[in-house]
Image (spheres, coloured by chain):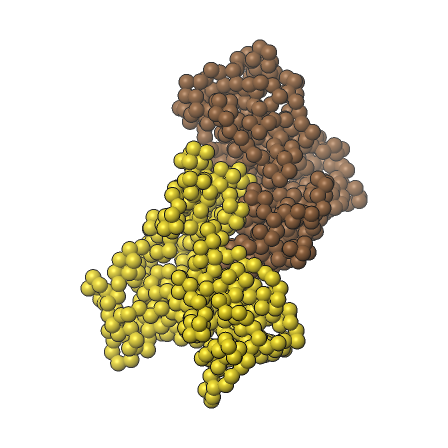
Chain colours: A brown, B yellow
């Protein structure tokens, strides 16, 4: 049995390890055009920040370790073609092209940074994106020699880099073309994030929203200035593009594999693509949303791991269902924890719900405790059924705890009234006597008349 | 309409405030034998520790503030009798006894420390219990003048005081007569708590288990020595008894109100006692366990608040159900967060379940992050139905997050398999790629064959 896996960061590496354990006698080959395999890309902002000195801390499993398990990993080997009829792939390295046959193929080609169409954006050496190990190394090296930086985009990676750069003493400007930072959140919560960040005293950064970058100007090989749609000119030592990512689906698409409406590879709950014996997992594929079963594309490391495992199990003949995602996520930026699960009010409306919501602003622990922070918690529910649809929390580190309690509630399809009975833990260093989540549910109950 | 409330710490104070808002024209009177009303007793160990200087930070609402809302609070007024036929209570203060009529009576008499039957335990002035504001003040004053202390009992309060005393430089000895500290936990988890605490370098405390105190000896007014069942003699400057609490039910019992098997006042889900127009709430009454509906006595501040609210609503004629508790709790002691929800394996067996369990020991965030701690997480499930029954977590502060996610799962009556689909938040400062909870569920799934 020949197993071929394309890509080896999170989903591909997990799939390779799992299927080899399930089918010890199978040949398992991983081809990746990357220079590294099996690493924590999510940790790159923390490497750049200097939380640890050696980037190799990010490497989960080396080529040699894979080899010991009987898995052959081929770095800098690009798969250029899938031939579903011949059941082989064409692999290209710096010397030649060759065919590799497969009985089961697992596509884990991941995603790549989206490069916005801006004048000059491809003309300079000091314009970076962050996706791979080398990107992290290059950005850190540049950062250590720089005093100013501009980040385009204010999503998760943009804000994680903002923290990294500010901690390293750089004046940092984040430019977000939408009207709010972290635009995946509801606008009111995005405002809380921005207000929180801007409340930092003597802050060494600017958050610019509602302006796009129209041109990057430079001298020689280096960009030196960013010009925005309002005519603002910002001098900088380097630029990082954090304008989102795009799934790598071209290889799959060329082979006739169906691409979903989200733009990522369509799979069923067994992680099977539209072609037999071909599976996909990780950032290159869609997944069902657990709340309403709709296909979504939520490319995250934790999901990639689960999908890699599920694809391997099914490819090995062990029937296993991946139920999907809730869109749960968390990050921190300087003084602010930012976390969400389920649908925002905005997305709930798009899906045809009649959402209602409440926001609670409260201490995260009793106010007499030193270090008590605060949380703004927004909970969204469906007016018709009373079901909880999602939550967003911003503030102290305890924001994340509340979102995880909501994630379980979404799995259980709990109504607001049911959750209002929750017995959450309480003691002064951990919560208020009535947890912000219960305040939110009581307020929602009042609105719903339940 | 005359509303009389007996007791005013958490449940009584909450009930008073709530019912006055619901029935603005009613007369609301609170009688308490305490010297303070409406305070956070859970915060007393943190006051003793010195987390804040003024004990008044613990006071939620003063007598004057109640007065402004039209509520009369009578401090140091003990209710000595309830006459359900005459619908009045007998109140005793330092001057006289008098009758107060009621249309609705709410009993929130709380609990009192259990005093173990030990030779000499009542003979000295420097033997303390911790329940009321004065207790906290007295213990703090004594602590500041002392170098050594012995704590009897290693439950929540015992361990919170251990932290307080150690932070203040006292050599502290905790004596637990059971074989494990925090005996409410399963023995394997109690061992993790003990090992965690004893791993502290140059620690200035001892944890003695499986020995009871047989005698307290002293000189004049002061205890100076504690003698254990093994003959150990421990010299000390003072002693704190943390051997549990007992519900104050004698007043209710004398009035013919039914006391439940747990020893606390029996109430229905509307917080009504067995006598009409008499409600009970807080530490003096039982509550149903949400998992199996059995009556339990889990006296905690968060529950007292909810029950006080529910009793007030029903006493005011607004039908409101209190669904009960999960036994969720959390505390911290020095380097260790200790949290649980639902049934332990031990309790699950007592209730007739066939529990299975797994324990996961794992980093609480990815290992390359500075400050990554670890968590030991035990999840208990029912072998027959696959339902999650409870969880216990010990270790870093993130232990509490996992327990709250489990609490929601218990409300949703999730099976292990359903929870294994959970989309918990992930990023390096907050979790491992696969959260410990999901590892636990995957291991349980393997055991259950699901």
Tell me the quarter of the picture where residue B62 sits: bottom right
The residue that appears at 32% across and 65% down in the rendered structure is: B152
As rendered, which of B327 and A16 lies closer to the eye? B327
The residue that appears at 61% across and 55% down in the rendered structure is: A441
Tell me the quarter of the picture where residue B2 sits: bottom right
Q: Quadrant of the C terminus of chain A?
A: bottom right
The residue that appears at 24% across and 67% down in the rendered structure is: B214
Q: Position of residue A226 (x, y in %)?
A: 73, 40
Q: Is residue B31 above or below residue A418?
A: below
- Residue A306 shows up from this direction: yes
As rendered, which of B220 and A115 lies closer to the eye? B220
Q: Is residue B334 above or below residue A32?
A: below
Q: Position of residue A227 (x, y in %)?
A: 76, 41
Q: Position of residue B439 (x, y in %)?
A: 45, 38
Residue lying at the far top of the rendered structure: A86
The residue that appears at 66% across and 22% down in the rendered structure is: A258
């Amino acid at each position: 049995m020949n197993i071929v896996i394309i890509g080896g960061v999170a989903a591909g590496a997990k799939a390779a390890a799992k299927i080899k354990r399930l089918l010890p006698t199978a040949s398992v080959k991983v081809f990746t055009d990357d220079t590294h395999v099996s690493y924590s890309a999510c940790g790159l902002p923390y490497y750049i920040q200097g939380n640890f000195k050696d980037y190799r801390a990010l490497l989960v499993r080396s080529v040699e370790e894979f080899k010991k398990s009987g898995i052959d990993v081929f770095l800098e080997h690009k798969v250029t073609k899938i031939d579903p009829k011949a059941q082989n792939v064409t692999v290209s390295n710096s010397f030649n092209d060759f065919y590799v046959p497969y009985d089961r193929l697992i596509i884990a080609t991941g995603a790549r940074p989206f490069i916005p169409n801006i004048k000059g954006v491809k003309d300079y050496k000091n314009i970076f994106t962050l996706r791979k190990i080398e990107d992290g190394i290059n950005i850190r090296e540049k950062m250590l020699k720089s005093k100013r930086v501009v980040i385009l985009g204010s999503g998760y990676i943009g804000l994680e880099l903002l923290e990294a750069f500010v901690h390293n003493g750089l004046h940092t400007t984040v430019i977000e073309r939408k009207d709010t930072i972290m635009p995946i959140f509801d606008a009111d919560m995005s405002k809380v994030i921005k207000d929180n960040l801007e409340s930092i005293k003597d802050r060494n950064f600017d958050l610019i929203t509602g302006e796009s970058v129209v041109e990057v100007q430079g001298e020689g090989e280096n960009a030196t200035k960013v010009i925005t749609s309002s005519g603002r000119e910002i001098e900088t030592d380097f630029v990082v593009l954090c304008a989102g990512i795009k799934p790598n689906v071209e290889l799959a698409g060329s082979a006739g594999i169906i691409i979903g409406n989200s733009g990522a590879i369509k799979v069923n709950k067994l992680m099977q693509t539209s072609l037999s014996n071909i599976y996909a997992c990780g950032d290159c594929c869609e997944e069902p949303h657990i709340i309403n079963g709709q296909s979504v594309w939520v490319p995250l490391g934790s999901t990639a791991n689960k999908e890699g495992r599920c694809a391997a199990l099914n490819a090995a003949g062990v029937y296993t269902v991946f139920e999907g995602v809730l869109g749960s996520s968390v990050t921190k930026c300087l003084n602010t924890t930012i976390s969400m699960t389920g649908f925002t009010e905005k997305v709930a409306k798009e899906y045809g719900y009649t959402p209602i919501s409440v926001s609670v602003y409260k201490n995260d622990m009793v106010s007499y405790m030193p270090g008590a922070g605060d949380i703004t918690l927004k909970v969204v529910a469906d007016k018709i059924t009373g079901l909880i649809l999602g939550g967003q929390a911003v503030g102290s580190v305890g924001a994340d705890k509340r979102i995880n309690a909501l994630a379980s509630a979404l799995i259980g399809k709990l109504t607001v009234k049911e959750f209002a009975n929750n017995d959450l833990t309480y003691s002064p260093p951990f919560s208020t006597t009535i947890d912000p989540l219960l305040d939110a549910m009581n307020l929602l109950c009042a609105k719903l008349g339940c």
